[in-house]
Image: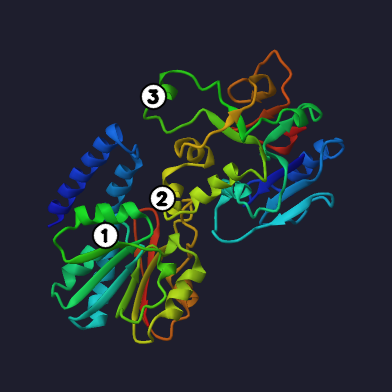
Amino acid sequence: MQSKILYKALKLVEEVYDESMYGVDDLYRIKDIVHSVDNNHWESKKWLADKLFDLYNHNAGKFYVAGGWYGMMAYQLRQKWISREMNIVSADCDPMCEEYAWKLFDGYDISFKTNDVNDEEDFSEYTAIINTSCEHMEQEDLISIIKKKDPQTWIAFQTNDYIDLNSHINCWPTAQFFAESLQLDFLAYVDTLQMKDFNRFMVIGK
Amino acid sequence: MNIVCVKFGIKYGPEFVNKLYADLKDQPRLTNFYCYTDDSYGLDKGIQVIPDMGRPTLKVWWNKLRMFDKNFPLSGETMFLDLDVKIQDPEKIFKIAGQQITFIDCHWKQGRLYNRLSNYDVKMNSSMITWNADDPEVHKIWDHFNTGLRDYYLRKYKGIDRFIVHEDFEYDTFGHEYIQSKKYQPDINYEPVITTFEELPVAIKDLI
């Protein structure tokens, strides 16, 4: 399964290169797409899917993946929730993410869309909100998501302590600090995944 | 003309802002001297502080783009200077504004490496910028940055220079005779208005 995704990523890279010659020159997409399927992202998103699967303990529902990028998080969720009774929506404010996600993860019954999570007024239809891009988002927006959701809706959020990137505007020094910052009513899981150069933190709760 | 500088983070202390202000404060064409900053501690009293305007949160040099927000509290002819710039001719600096937004031409970046079509590095530099703060064309730079692609731009581009060039904004450049790059032009036979220490470590004593 992993080789199939990596092959699709390679074909996408080829497409981006071809497009750079005859249309929009955006070769950085190649690096971005490669990052999105690298081992760091594969492992950290699989970690979330595995832990949430244990805690959620249902086959049915509707998941919203905020900042879903090119779809790896949604794909990892689908690997655990194989039933059609689980509806998975992956949203990102970058319109190219939707276009490439459909190509990378076509056939996995995932709905990709272009949307800024801050424009979502109503989360009541979702049984879990997943966000592995918290380091890229304003803290008050994370709090706003939590305040807008139904009290029984799960959240599964990840951030990290990798402060050296300019796009990382919301890093935290420890998983516990990150958990406290979210002001959840119920904490089910708080832990750290040590990566090669940084730590990834995850909080699951309601 | 307004002079504005940007100080975010801890790379440069208030002494760099105060030095720039001291070099320019007596010039008759100076309207006001502004510092856009997240920490105004230690700045001289004559400096007009523009506090951090908040969302979107930006890190270090990306805050320079905020100057092109139509809500940024400046009006009229404006010049930005980096804090690692040494003022060589404080009088002449007020006479070199371009017709549209104007940056430094890095004419010293020559050779095959820089001329490749696929090269992401650019031959302009934002250590000194002049523009009219009321110009709607300039406001488009900030508006363009704040689309759904903002986070992508922050990953894609090392800084605002590459963002402005690769996102196809039009700009002018200053005459070469006004600028010295300390790194690339250590010895020159003309009298520049500024020396930029871009890509070099700089201490306050280097700017005196």
Q: Quadrant of residue B192?
A: top right
Give the letter of the chain under mark 2.
Answer: B
Label 1 secondary element: loop
**Proximity of marks 2 and 3: CB atoms separated by less than 8 Å:** no
Quarter of the image with the C terminus of chain B is top right
Quarter of the image with the N terminus of chain B is top right
On the picture, is B29 further left or further right than A153? Answer: right
Q: Which residue is mark 3?
A: B116
Residue extending furthest top?
A: B189
**Which residue is more in the foreground, B104 or B86?**
B104
Dot 2 crowding, Cα within 10 Å, few <14, some 14–19, many 20+? some
Q: Which residue is mark 1?
A: A71
| Residue A87 showing in the rendered view | yes
Q: In the image, residue A114 lies at what x, y percent?
A: 33, 60
Residue at image location 79% in from the left, 42% down from the top: B21
Q: Which residue is mark 2?
A: B152
**Proximity of marks 2 and 1: CB atoms separated by less than 8 Å:** no
Q: Earlier in the sequence, mark 2 or mark 3?
A: 3
- The amino acid type, in three-letter code, at marker 2 is Tyr
Dot 1 crowding, Cα within 10 Å, few <14, some 14–19, many 20+? many
Please, is residue B41 above or below residue B124 in the view? below
The answer to whether dots 1 and 3 both sit on one chain is no
